Image (tube, rainbow, N blue to C red):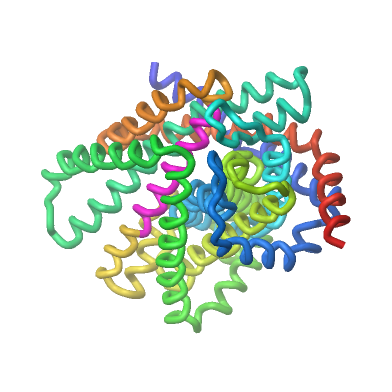
């Protein structure tokens, strides 16, 4: 039975994350870019100015809402995760250094896609029975496209609920336990016989922490993420910049390999990665998987923001993709490529490749810091996806099911800490991709609304 499930899921997964999906995501990104006059270029300085200025605005949010800063931190909490560490490493190993170039292209288009998602989410959001703002793809489908398209909203929410337990929780907890075990084993504080018991203990602790945060509602989620996200990003960026500085002589050659490898991967990888399309596919798919532009999930958090301007909040979408992919993913790539570690081109690789980049530069002592960074990345992802799952299941049923869902979601952390998750990860990745289909259809059909809102916003600004 499991073998049949694996085969069916593998076939669907390869289709969802294959060429058709890439064409759809790239196509919608280009379409939105053209319709908005490439807003991500024209208004990029304005977007950075607006978002940086509002990030440090000290105003408290109204009841049932987050501050704009808390909203973007919650969205970043879900997007800036292990994909930035393991995902980039995997893209480089399978697609060569040129995959990084295609990540940049995916981010360029994704900035406009995410801007549109966030703008629509705030514009079409509602207030639930508790007075909380609720929004996201299911709401802009429901309120923007009408009842004939309601089935798309239901599909998005259904796929969202099925995704969060794997992508958002179990696999992230597994990353945390792996990182902690690696550090403890490296310093010989434990031996392999203690690992199963330690994993169970960590699973129970994590389940308790997740429940404590999520059951506190959007206010508590916002307060946790606004502290955790800047800390983890700062720690990781500083460590990564240090690797680049200490290997500065390699930087020109690395950037040359990225540009050259994007179009001639075999020339950089010694012929092991010989497909231009493989390099492009891995770059785009990992970039999208990291920044979630096109999936629509991040807009769920942004819809909670205490703001009256959909377009103004939309600029946070541009900032979010820029931070996630252009800054953090690029730094991860530079850590791997500048440090001179052996990249196993043509075979699977993950977080261990990124960690090798750090340890080869700093020494084994840095493994404790990379473990802390990975734990922060993973835990923040659990919190962010917990909110996404709650909003999806609330849309399908009612707000009464949120707390039972949060309890079940928290307990999944114990499962993630104690069992092998290869099949669960693959299934969750498939449902993650399926979420993009109804969202991309909605973005295409509602592109006129985005253009209208942008024109109205800048007419008032002028």
Whether residue 15 is visible to the viewer of this picture, yes or no, is no
- The residue lying at 69 percent from left, 50 percent from top is 314
Q: Position of residue 448 (x, y in %)?
A: 85, 40
Relative side of 69 to 188, left or right: right
Q: Quadrant of the C terminus?
A: bottom right
Q: Quadrant of residue 352?
A: bottom left
The vertical placement of 347 against 412, above or below, is: below
Q: Which residues are magenta?
A: 373-392
Estimate the x, y position of residue 54 in percent, counting from the top left: 62, 61
Q: How many marks?
A: 0
Q: Is residue 303 left or right of residue 161?
A: right
Q: Residue at x 54, y 77 (%)?
A: 251
88 or 456: nearer the eye?
A: 456
Is residue 20 depicted above or below 273 in this figure? above
Whether residue 438 is situated above or below residue 339 in the rendered picture:
above
Percent across and percent down for residue 246 are 42, 81
Q: Is residue 361 left or right of residue 135?
A: left
Residue farthest top in this picture: 1
Which residue is rendered at x = 50% and y = 53% of the image? 80
Q: Residue at x 72, y 29 (%)?
A: 141
Residue 376 appears in the rendering: yes
- Quadrant in which residue 289 is drawn: top right
Residue 150 in the magenta stretch? The answer is: no
Q: Position of residue 185 (x, y in %)?
A: 18, 56
């Amino acid at each position: 039975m499991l073998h049949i499930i694996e085969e069916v899921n593998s076939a669907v997964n390869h289709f969802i994350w294959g060429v058709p999906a890439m064409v759809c995501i790239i196509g919608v990104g280009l379409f939105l870019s053209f319709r908005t006059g490439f807003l991500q270029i024209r208004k990029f300085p304005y977007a950075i100015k607006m978002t940086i200025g509002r990030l440090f605005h000290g105003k408290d949010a109204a009841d049932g809402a987050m501050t704009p800063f808390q909203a973007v931190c919650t969205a970043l909490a879900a997007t800036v995760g292990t994909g930035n560490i393991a995902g980039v490493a995997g893209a480089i190993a399978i697609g060569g250094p040129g995959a990084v170039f295609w990540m940049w292209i995916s981010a360029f288009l994704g900035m406009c896609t995410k801007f549109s998602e966030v703008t629509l989410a705030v514009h079409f959001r509602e207030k639930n029975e508790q007075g909380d703002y609720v929004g996201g793809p299911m709401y802009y489908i429901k309120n923007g496209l009408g009842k004939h398209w309601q089935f798309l909203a239901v599909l998005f929410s259904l796929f969202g609920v099925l995704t969060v337990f794997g992508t958002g929780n179990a696999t992230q907890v597994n990353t945390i336990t792996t990182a902690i075990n690696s550090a403890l084993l490296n310093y010989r504080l434990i031996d392999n016989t203690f690992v199963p018991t330690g994993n169970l203990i960590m699973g129970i602790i994590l389940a308790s922490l997740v429940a404590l945060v999520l059951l506190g509602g959007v206010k508590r989620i916002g307060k946790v993420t606004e502290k955790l996200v800047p800390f983890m990003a700062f720690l990781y960026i500083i460590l990564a910049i240090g690797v680049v500085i200490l290997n500065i002589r390699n930087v020109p050659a690395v950037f040359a390999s990225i540009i050259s490898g994007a179009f001639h991967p075999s020339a950089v990888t010694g012929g092991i990665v010989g497909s231009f399309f493989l390099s492009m596919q891995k770059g785009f798919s990992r970039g999208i998987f990291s920044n979630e532009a096109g999936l629509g999930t991040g807009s769920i958090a942004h819809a909670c923001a205490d703001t009256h301007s959909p377009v103004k909040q939309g600029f946070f979408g541009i900032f979010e993709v820029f931070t996630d992919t252009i800054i953090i993913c690029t730094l991860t790539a530079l850590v791997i490529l500048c440090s001179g570690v052996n990249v196993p081109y043509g075979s699977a690789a993950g977080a261990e490749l990124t960690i090798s980049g750090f340890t080869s530069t700093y020494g084994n002592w840095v493994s404790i810091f990379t473990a802390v960074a990975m734990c922060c990345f993973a835990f923040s992802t659990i919190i962010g996806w917990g909110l996404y799952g709650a909003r999806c299941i609330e849309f399908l049923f009612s707000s009464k099911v949120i707390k039972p869902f949060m309890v079940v979601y928290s307990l999944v952390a114990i499962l993630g800490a104690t069992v092998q998750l290869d099949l669960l990860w693959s299934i969750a990745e498939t449902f993650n991709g399926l979420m993009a289909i109804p969202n991309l259809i909605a973005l295409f059909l509602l592109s006129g609304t985005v253009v209208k809102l942008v024109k109205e916003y800048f007419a008032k600004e002028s």
